Amino acid sequence: MTGSGPKKLYGGGMMNRRAVVTGASTGIGEATVRALRAQRWDVVGVARRAERLEALAEETGSAALACDLTDADAVEAMLAELARTGPVHALVQVAGGARGTDSVEGGSVEDWQWMYDANVLSTQRLVAGILPLLREAAAQSGHADMVFVTSTAAQIGYPGGGGYNAAKAAESMLVKVLRQELNGEPIRVVEIAPGMVHTEEFTLNRLGGDRVAAEAVYAGVEEPLLAQDVADVIAFALDAPRRVNLDLVTMRPVAQSAQHMLARGPLQVRTDVD
Ligand SMILES: NC(=O)c1ccc[n+]([C@@H]2O[C@H](COP(=O)([O-])OP(=O)(O)OC[C@H]3O[C@@H](n4cnc5c(N)ncnc54)[C@H](OP(=O)(O)O)[C@@H]3O)[C@@H](O)[C@H]2O)c1
C-alpha cells in the first residue's frame, strides 16, 4: 500500500500529521510506528516499556512516551505531555492482549479483570482524554482519526476464549457506539479486526510464558498474518481520502477461513474437484 505522497497541510503550514500509537513497544503497534513513519507521519509511541520505545524512536525518528494505560494518573500525565508537544491528528489504539485459555467455568477472575482493564477500560479512558486534542487538530486541519485494533475474537466465541472474547467484543462495541456518537464531526472511527497474527509476545503472554505451547499455536499454519500486514492496513486507513471511513476491516490469514477453522499444513490446490 502506498503513502499519500507530499506532507499534509495543517495549521497553515506544510507539516506532518501526528499520530499516537499505543502498544508501540512490540508487535502490531511497533510495526504501525514503522509504517506511519514511512508514510511521513510524526508518531508518538506509547507503551509501558520505555527502553523499547526509545530504541524504536532512535531507529525511526518517532517519539516515546512510556505510560501504563490502566493507570488513570499516568494517562493524564501522558495526555498533558501530548498537549504540550503539539497537535494530535490520530490515535491508533493497539495496546491490549489476552491472558489464559481457561473455560468460563474454570476461568480466573484476575485474568478476566486484566483483560477488561487492558482492552476496554484503557480504551475508554484514552478516548475520553484524547478527544479534546483530536477535536482541536480537526478544527485546524479538517479532520482527525481514531483506529482501534480489536480482533476476530470480538466476533465469534470459541472454547477457552471466554475472557478474551468478552473483552474484545466489549471493545468492539465501544468503537461502534463511539462512531455513532461522533456522527456529524470530521473524526473517523476505524476498527481493524485481525485473526491470527504471529507476533513475538501475544500468545506467549497469553500462555503465561510457555514458549513451547505458544509455538504450537502457530505450528504448521502456512503464513499467519504478520504485524506488518495489520500495520499496512492501519496506515492505509489513515491515509485514505478523508471522506472514506473503513468502519470495520476483518483480516485473516488465508489458512484461517473462520475463527475456528485453521488449516495446518501447506495450502494445496484441490485436485479432486471436477
Ligand atoms: N497477535 C494476534 O494474533 C492478535 C490478533 C487479533 C488482535 N490482536 C490484538 O492486537 C493488539 C496487539 O496485538 P500484538 O500481537 O501486537 O500484541 P503484543 O505483541 O502482546 O503487544 C501488546 C502491546 O500492548 C502494550 N500494552 C499492554 N498492556 C499495556 C498497558 N497496560 N499500558 C500500555 N501498553 C500496554 C504492550 O507494551 P508494554 O508491555 O511495553 O506495555 C505491547 O506493546 C492487541 O490489542 C491484541 O488483542 C492480536
Image (spheres, rainbow, N blue to C red):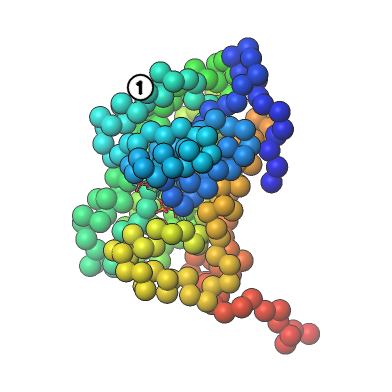
Tell which residue pokes out farthest to the top in this image. 12
The answer to which image quadrant residue 141 occupies is top right
Quick one: 208 or 117, which is closer to the camera? 208
Which residue occupies 25% across, 29% down?
73
Vertically, is 238 above or below 223? above
Q: On the picture, is 171 further left or further right than 237? A: left
Quick one: 252 or 162, which is closer to the camera? 252
Vertically, is 209 above or below 122? below
Tell which residue pokes out farthest to the left in this image. 109
Q: Position of residue 15 (x, y in %)?
A: 61, 21
Beta carbon at label 1 within 8 Å of ligand 1: no
Q: Position of residue 149 (x, y in %)?
A: 48, 46
Which residue occupies 43% across, 59% down?
200
Tell which residue pokes out farthest to the bottom in this image. 272
The answer to which image quadrant residue 13 occupies is top right
Q: On the picture, is 143 further left or further right than 97? A: right
Q: Amino acid at mark 1?
A: Ala
Q: Position of residue 102 (x, y in %)?
A: 28, 67
Q: On the picture, is 34 further left or further right than 150? A: right
Question: Dot 1: within a 10 Å radius of its alpha carbon, few (fewer than 14), some, or many (20 or more) residues?
Answer: few
Label 1 element class: helix
| Residue identified by numbered label 1 | 80
Vertically, is 266 above or below 40? below
The answer to which image quadrant residue 215 occupies is bottom left
Would residue 188 be visible to someone looking at this image?
yes
